[in-house]
Amino acid sequence: MPYIIDLSGQVAIVTGGAKGIGRATCRLLAEAGADIVLDDIRDEREARPTIDYIESLGRRVVFVQADVSIKEDAERIASTALNAFGQIDILVNNAGVSEDWERTLAVNATGQYLCAMAVLPHMVARGKGRIINISSTCAMTGSTGAPAYVVSKGGSFSLTRYLAREYAPKGILVNGIMPAVIQTDMLMARYKTEEALLAHYLPQIPIRRIGQPEDIARIVLFLCSDLSNYISGEIITADGGRMWGS
């Protein structure tokens, strides 16, 4: 009998859920049966296609326009989830930016911490929960040419290890993902055309294709499932083999 990942009856918060990896994650978790709290700093209109898709599956979805770098906003995301659904099973800390130093660290590192702190009391009280932090391979390689982004993703990496060690005994599994070269708006902004993007990156990637947001969403789904029940504090590299040589 085939194994099916079934998240029915679970509630997932996805930050930065309107675009890119966040959008793909919202869709896939909903396809697996989860109800979704979709946070984004963008207007709800940009999240509307994702909201409509989730509702077409018969799943429930709530949109929250919030800035994860503000403590009160992070707490509002959690309280909205609890008010709407009565529980929080999954937090996907996906929201990210590459801007000036203060803003980048505030969103990519502090934002992940604030959102985790907002949901953890509830998860601890229930004795279970999953937190997945989206980092980047640049935390290991130092690449990208954007020092604030590198440092912020290093913070995400270390935060994942800290939270995992602290909260695994309380039933909460915390893991991370380090993507690289994923075809999102953030990556495309660095290139004039898709052809230029492919010309630059394909020779560096052993599997010879650019990553798609769905590639990362599938790893999130795995980390949310019973298949990963013995994994805690792991940060999974998802870069088509690029870090290990072309």
Image (tube, rainbow, N blue to C red):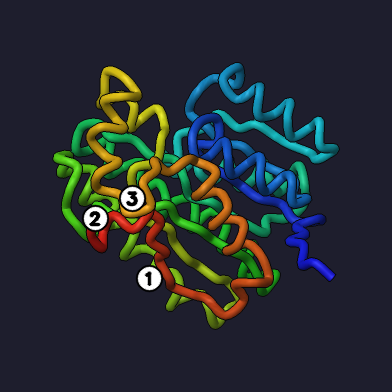
Foreground of the two, 233 or 109: 233
Question: What amino acid is at disc 3?
Answer: Ala
Q: CA distance from mark 2 to mark 1?
A: 29 Å
Please report the residue visible at 24 percent of the width from the left and 47 percent of the height from the top.
Answer: 204
- Which of the marked residues, 3 or 2, is nearer the chain's N terminus? 3
Q: Which mark is residue 246?
A: 2
- Which of the marked residues, 1 or 3, is nearer the chain's N terminus? 3
| SS at circle 1 | helix
| SS at circle 2 | loop
Binning the other alpha carbons within 10 Å of mark 3 as few (below 14), some (14 to 19) or many (20 upward) gives many
Pointer 3 residue: 109
Q: Quadrant of the N terminus?
A: bottom right
- Which of the marked residues, 2 or 1, is nearer the chain's N terminus? 1
Q: Is residue 58 toward the left or the right of residue 225 in the image?
A: right
Which mark is in front, 2 or 1?
2
Question: What amino acid is at disc 1?
Answer: Arg
Pointer 1 residue: 161
Q: Is residue 116 toward the left or the right of residue 198 in the image?
A: right
Q: Position of residue 234 (x, y in %)?
A: 43, 71
Q: Quadrant of the C terminus?
A: bottom left
